[in-house]
Image: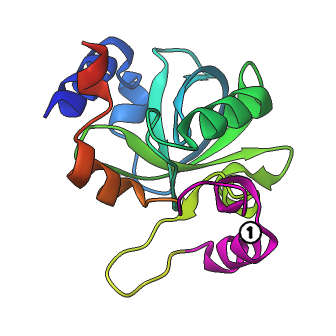
């Protein structure tokens, strides 16, 4: 509930430009990443102007910011995309009002990169292992990122973490 309030506040302050608000799914546009919220959410200033757009990276689920691996995912994404011009491949809006989209920098899908480096999971739904299951399997087998063998405990999928500990964003209020 608290995360919903924080995300709603972000959306209110950084809602999409009027042109993007009515854009159909699968719209493609460019902009500059102005803020990295966490390992799977960024704000992108459209090249054509308007307010920054709150974007949830499609196909991945990064550790929560307060869970093991969350800061590493945030920091890696920030180093890669902050201040850079990216291509946004829009899909849909999520329950929090964020645009769900692929973020591409220099022709490289950033969600795929995060998963390949063990910084996020391929977003799974029911029995579907997600679009980056191959990259996740390779990262796990290689012990990359959160799958490193030196970790004290096995990584916990973010949805399970939230069930056990609640929202990280409630801790920052």
Percent coordinates x, y for residue 93 in the rendering: 33, 47
Quadrant (top left/top right/bottom left/bottom right) for the N terminus: top left
Q: Quadrant of residue 171?
A: top left
Residue in view at x 50 percent, y 57 percent: 26
Q: As displayed, is residue 4 above or below residue 163?
A: above
Q: Is residue 150 magenta?
A: yes
Residue in view at x 66 percent, y 62 percent: 147
Q: Quadrant of residue 51?
A: top left
Residue in view at x 31 percent, y 81 percent: 126
Q: As displayed, is residue 70 above or below residue 117?
A: above
Q: Decide if residue 1 is in sight here.
A: yes
Q: As displayed, is residue 48 above or below residue 72?
A: above
Residue ranking furthest to the right: 106
Magenta part of the chain:
131-154
SS assignment at label 1 = helix
Q: Decide if residue 47 is in sight here.
A: no
* Relative horizontal placement of residue 150, taking residue 69 as reference (left or right): right
Residue ranking furthest to the left: 1
Quadrant (top left/top right/bottom left/bottom right) for the C terminus: top left
Q: Which residue is mark 1?
A: 139
Q: Nearer the viewer, residue 12 or 76?
A: 76
Percent coordinates x, y for residue 56 in the rendering: 46, 43
- The tally of labels here is 1
* Relative horizontal placement of residue 13, taking residue 53 as reference (left or right): left
Label 1 crowd bin: few (<14), some (14–19), many (20+), radius 10 Å: many
Q: Which color scheme does this rendered protein use? A: rainbow
């Amino acid at each position: 509930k608290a995360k919903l309030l924080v995300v709603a506040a972000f959306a209110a302050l950084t809602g999409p430009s009027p042109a993007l608000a009515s854009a159909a799914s699968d719209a493609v546009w460019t902009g500059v990443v102005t803020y990295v919220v966490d390992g799977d959410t960024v704000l992108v200033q459209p090249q054509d102007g308007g307010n920054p757009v709150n974007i949830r990276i499609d196909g991945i689920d990064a550790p929560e910011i307060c869970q093991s691996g969350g800061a590493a995912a945030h920091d890696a994404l920030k180093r890669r995309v902050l201040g850079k011009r990216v291509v946004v491949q829009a899909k849909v809006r999520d329950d929090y009002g964020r645009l769900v989209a692929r973020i591409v920098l220099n022709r490289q899908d950033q969600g795929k990169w995060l998963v390949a480096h063990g910084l996020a999971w391929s977003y799974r739904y029911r029995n579907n292992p997600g679009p980056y299951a191959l990259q996740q399997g390779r990262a796990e087998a290689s012990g990359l990122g959160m799958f490193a063998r030196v970790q004290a405990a096995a990584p916990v999928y973010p949805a399970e973490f939230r069930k056990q500990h609640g929202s990280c964003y409630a801790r920052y209020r």
